[in-house]
Amino acid sequence: FEYRSDCPLAKTLEVIGDRWSLIIIRDLAYGPKTYSELESSPEKITTNILANRLKKLTTFNIVEKTLYQEKPKRYTYRLNNKGK
């Protein structure tokens, strides 16, 4: 991923500056959640957007995922220290 600017604020906005990322962060601020718990947010995030934002937030080391079921693979998501 290449940032458009070297400004720390602009970089942060590129990662978490959209509505869905902020809603996911809000939900995770209350504790770890499963994918289905995040999906059932009152804002009705679609599965493709949710999967995309979780991948992005994980890639940027804001959210951490932990395997809790092997078959099929299922994860819980939580904010790490950077995310908090």
Image (spheres, helix red, strand yellow):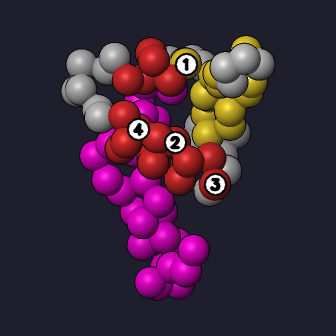
Where is mark 3, residue-wise? 59
Q: Secondary structure at mark 1?
A: strand
Q: Residues within 10 Å of mark 2 (few under 14, many from 20)?
A: many
Q: Position of residue 14 (x, y in %)?
A: 42, 66
Of the 4 image quadrants, the one containing the N terminus is bottom right
Q: Is residue 5 visible?
A: yes
Amino acid of disc 3: Thr
Where is mark 1, residue-wise? 34
Q: Mark 2 and 4 residues: CB-CB less than 8 Å, in contact?
A: yes
Of the numbered discs in the image, which one, if any, rests on residue 50? 4
The residue that appears at 46% across and 84% down in the rendered structure is: 5
Q: Mark 1 and 4 residues: CB-CB less than 8 Å, in contact?
A: no
> How many numbered circles does the render carry?
4
Amino acid of disc 1: Thr
Precedes in sequence: disc 2 or disc 3: 2
Q: Secondary structure at mark 4?
A: helix
Of the 4 image quadrants, the one containing the C terminus is top right
Amino acid of disc 2: Leu
Q: Which residues are magenta?
A: 1-28
Q: Is residue 73 above or below residue 1?
A: above
Of the numbered discs in the image, which one, if any, rests on residue 54? 2
Magenta stretch, overall SS? helix
